[in-house]
Amino acid sequence: MDQSAHSQTTLSRLPNRVLSRQLDDASGFAEIFARWNGQFHQMSRGKFEGSIDVVTGQRVRLFQAKTNQAILTRGMDSQFATFIPITPRNAATRWSGCNLNPGDLIAKFPEAEYNNQTIPDTSIRALLVPVCTLQEMTCILAGGSSETNFPSWSALRPEPKAMERFERGLAELLTTSLRSPKIVGGAEGKSLEMECLRRLIDALLHPSVTEPARMREKNRRLLVRRALDVMHDRLNEPLTAIELCAELGASDRSLRRAFREAFGLGPLAYFRVIRLHQVRVTLKGARGSDVSVAEIARRWGFHRLGSFSNEYRRQFGELPSRTLKVRGRPSVNQGASVL
C-alpha cells in the first residue's frame, strides 16, 4: 500500500469526538490515555485537581491537560507523532530529563517513550499527528520533496514567528472545537486542522526549507494564474493551503510570496475576499422573499453565519442582511403611481 493510501486508511479510523473532563485523581489520565499503557503518578502532596480536553479530529488529535500537582508521566504512543510547544506554563517540566525554554518545540515520534515530570500548576497542549500524514503533508508543503528526518525525540528551536503562528493555530483549533464540538467532523473542522498542520510543518522546516533566493517574476505570475484557476473552480467550497499546494505542486512559501507580491494578501486571505465578493454580487441580485442571507452564504461555502457576518461587515462596511434588503429586493413603493 502506498503512503497516501495508508494515510487515508489511518485517518478514516479516527472517530470525531470531543472529550472534556474534570479529574480528582491523576489515575484519570491513565483511563483516558489507556492506549499508551501509560503511568501517571502524582509526585507532590495535596488534593489533586486537574482537567483534560481531548479533540479527535479528521486528521489529528490534540489535547490540553492542566494539573495543580506535580505529575510523572511515562508511556508510549505507537501511532502518533506528538508535538508540544514549550510555554511559560510548562517550561519547568523535565522533558525526558531535559529542561527546556519557552519557544522550544518537542517532537516525539512513536518509537520514543513519554518520560516527563511536571511541577505543580502546569498546563500542556499537544498536537498528535499520524506519522504517514505528517510525512505526506511535509512533502506537499516543501514543494514536492522533503529530506527532513527527526530523531525519535528532539527539542527543536523554530524561528520565533513561525512558532508563534503554530501556537496560535493550535489554540484556535482547540478552543473552537471545545466551544462548537459539531464542527469537528465537518468542513470547518477540517479547514482548522489543515491550517494547524501547515503552521506546524512551517515551524518544523523553517529555516531549513527555503525557496531559491530569486524566483523569476514570470514564474511567480504563472503560479498566481494557476492558483486563481483552482480558486475559481472551488469558489463554493472551502480550500485549504495544503490542498492548494498539492494541486499546484508548489511550496507553501513560494505560493504565499507570489500572492503577496501580486495582491498584498496571502492566497487563502485572497480566496476569502473573492468569495465574499461573490456573496455580495449574489445578494445584490437576489429577488423574492424566499431568499435568505444564510442560503446565499452557504452557497459560497460560508457555513458559520456569525463569523461570516463579521467578515462581511469588515470587508464592506455593512451587514449582509442590509445588502440584501437595500440592494436586492425592490422597494415596497416600487411600481406605484407617482401621480
Image: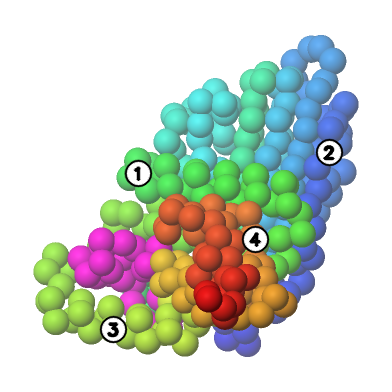
Going by the numbered disc 4, the residue's amino acid type is: Arg
Going by the numbered disc 2, the residue's amino acid type is: Arg
Label 1, label 2: how far apart the Cα atoms are = 33 Å
Q: Is residue 9 magenta?
A: no
Q: Earlier in the sequence, mark 4 or mark 2?
A: 2
Q: Residues within 10 Å of mark 2 (few under 14, many from 20)?
A: some
With 202 as the anchor, is 292 left or right in this view?
right
Residue positioned 80% across, 42% down in the render: 20
For label 2, the SS is strand
Q: Position of residue 78 (x, y in %)?
A: 69, 59
Going by the numbered disc 3, the residue's amino acid type is: Arg
Q: Position of residue 88 (x, y in %)?
A: 51, 26
Frontmost of labels 4 and 2 is 4
**Which colouring convention does the figure follow?**
rainbow
Going by the numbered disc 1, the residue's amino acid type is: Lys
Label 3, label 2: how far apart the Cα atoms are = 49 Å
Frontmost of labels 3 and 2 is 3
Of 217 and 75, nearer the camera is 217
Label 4, label 3: how far apart the Cα atoms are = 29 Å
For label 3, the SS is helix
Q: Position of residue 144 (x, y in %)?
A: 37, 78
Please give the residue where the numbered disc 4 appears in the rendered image.
304
Please give the residue where the numbered disc 2 appears in the rendered image.
21
Q: Quadrant of residue 57?
A: bottom right
Q: Quadrant of the N terminus?
A: bottom right
Tell me which secondary structure the magenta stretch mostly adopts: helix
For label 4, the SS is loop
The magenta stretch is: 245-270
Q: Which mark is residue 225?
A: 3
